[in-house]
Amino acid sequence: MLDHRQKIIGEDTVLFEHIWKSGKGFYITVSILGALVLLGLYAYVTQYRTGLAVTGLSRQIFWGVYITNFVFFIGISHAGTFISAVLRILKAEWRRPISRLSELTTVFILMFGVGSVLIDLGRPDRMLYAIRYANFQSPLLWDVCSIATYLTVSSISLYLALIPDIAMLRDLGGKREWFYRILSLGWRGTEGQHHRLDKAIGFVSVLVIPVMITVHTVVSFVFAMTIQPLWHSAIFGPYFVVGAIFSGVASVIVVMAVLRKAYHLENYIKPIHFNNIGIFLMAMTLLWFYFTFAEYITIVYGNEPIHMAIFWSKISGKFAPLFWLHFVLCFIIPLPILAIRKYRTIRGTVIASISIILGMWLERFVIIVPTLTRQRMPVDGAYYIPTWVEWSILTGCISLFMLLYTLFTKVFPIVPVWEVREGREKAVTQVGERIRSYLPETGADQNLLSPGGRG
Amino acid sequence: MEFNRRAFIKIAGLSILGLSVKPGWQVFSKIDTPEPSPDAETLAQRKWGMGIYLQKCWKDAGCRVCIDACHRIHNVPNLGTLKEEIKWVWTEPYEKVFPEHEFEVTEEDYRHKPVLLLCNQCDDPPCVRYCPTRATWKREDGIVMMDFHRCIGCRYCMAGCPYGSRSFNWRDPRPFIKNVNLEFPTRTRGVVEKCNFCVERLAQNKIPACVEACKEKALVFGDLKDPRSEIREALKFKTLYQRQPELGTKPKVYYIL
């Protein structure tokens, strides 16, 4: 019996340990997160009973923290796909231990993106009207369609890569065997099954990338399709996609660091992972700056009074502190940390990432709110200070996300065991062969050996 | 076919599931019957429009008669704060409303004159496109309608309206209405509202309440399609302003200088 277990677990004991062992830290974390979720829930109940009057929103500034959360959370969700699907297609071997944790971030945070819009509704009891009386002219309906597709595809992607690990847990037996038995779909790990799984994952990975780009493009269209100054911008689609990947990748770095520490995954999630993603994040920092620059220089040079009024409210007016803070957090702080090799350590990338995450939340805020203070006409009484309800709901959302994440790791391994093993057992030789096929000495026909295959 | 207990339970379960689809769907998306609309063809023969004589309007400084008349009959609540303010008709200073007609040499007192604002009843209304549930739509006679029973309160129409004509019910408005007019619906919290060009009065062949209330006759109302209508006479050979005509929304509220 013990031999049987040992055979399944192999050298990867630590990958299973977090499922079985719950230390003091686990219970403390769950209690704190649970309490914060209850606080958020209490805030929402308050809002549900009195109406949105309990928020800081007003006739002039009618979108605030909730819509910011919507854009922000959906932005974060782009990371999972990016890290796992793109790196999978590019055959980047180092992605193996981190693919699941990033996909999980996508699936869970996406739900809060959707939730934020529902929280923002004046009549949440009528939310299904958006389907029943759907008006497909409305960008909000485009959002409904693309986000639903994205949630489906990324959930499938997460689940497919879970199957072999679920089968392992099933074979280990125990109280929850029945549960794993159902989910494992009869996986036995045969050659044919692996072949089919590879094909399915490959297909989903390719499919999810255009879906991901669509999602944040139409999220930006909610703003870009209006004729409000500084929202009505053709650059918003790509700008939001870049910002989404930017903040999402930063979140993955933070998640990696937390899991590595909490579950002792030092041998699996290594400094090289932080370094590699850190370099990518640096590229995204520059790309983000490029888009921000392109967006604002067009407005400044055009010098239209309506646009300039809002532009100045960001640069030197009442939104200046927030605007410059977001610029510092998104660019000035992360760029040197990520660019200089010496600082691109685990600690360095985590600091840069936290800075980017905060900065990107603020970025969404300073895109949404200033435009509403004076659309085409300066309006009186346009001020917005979010109330405790809005902050509590934000805290509650983030806490519930972390709680769901923690509970997931109590049921499934967070590092894909089978993928790591596949890397250990097969990929080393495969990659060697692949590199040999690049060399001039190899025959031309051998170059065509594994098109589309996952190395 | 053998009909044992197992099969019975299966079929019974499936039947219950099947039968509950429709009621379940109804429960989760409460059915509201849409307001019956008069014959579309008759409506389409007309196109309502309004003209506002600025000079006449400015005769009596601080006059609010039309605003009060409108808000009274439409059960518009007075919440007493700028934050939760609900308004169908209101004023803003000339320099803010018509910055394109505001020059360095414009007379000082002209700048601060109040300009009456209301929903422009655009001929190409952006708000209608944005609404995810078609709770706002353009009627055949050009009036931009609003269904308070279908609005989900997303406020996208407010983001889409370049004129700031829409208000949102941040809380239950009913306690803030002094005398409820039982002939017009009150709103619940969480829905958007705006001027409806007195569609309910037009149905009774009456002119809008604000037009009727104005003692200076500063407001004119009528059918823009009829060349002999009062409104067409009023607009003839006059200098006319519209709010942001460059946006292509084609407002049907004209300001006459």
Image (tube, rainbow, N blue to C red):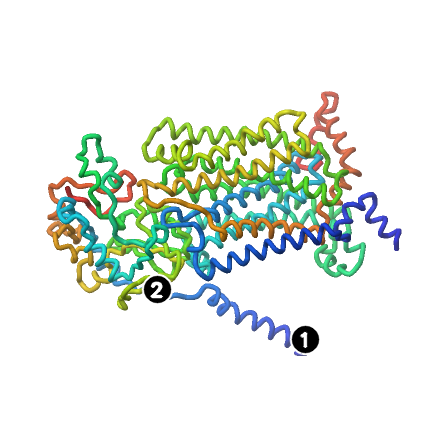
Q: Which mark is residue B175?
A: 2
Residue A438, relative to residue A241: is it above or below? above
Tell me which label, 1 or 2, sits earlier in the chain. 1
Few, some or many residues within 10 Å of mark 1 (<14, 14–19, 20+): few
Q: Pick whichever, B162 or A160, lies toward us.
A: B162
Q: Are marks 1 and 2 on the same chain?
A: yes
Give residue A11's quadrant in the image: top right
Q: Circle 1 is placed at which residue position?
A: B6
Residue A406, relative to residue B205: is it above or below? above
Locate residue A28 relative to residue A332 in the image: left or right. Answer: right
Few, some or many residues within 10 Å of mark 2 (<14, 14–19, 20+): few
Q: Amino acid at mark 2?
A: Pro
Kindly tell me whether residue A29 is visible in this rendering: yes
Q: Position of residue A63 (x, y in %)?
A: 43, 47
Q: Nearer the viewer, mark 1 or mark 2?
A: 2
Q: Position of residue B250 (x, y in %)?
A: 26, 44
Q: Amino acid at mark 1?
A: Arg
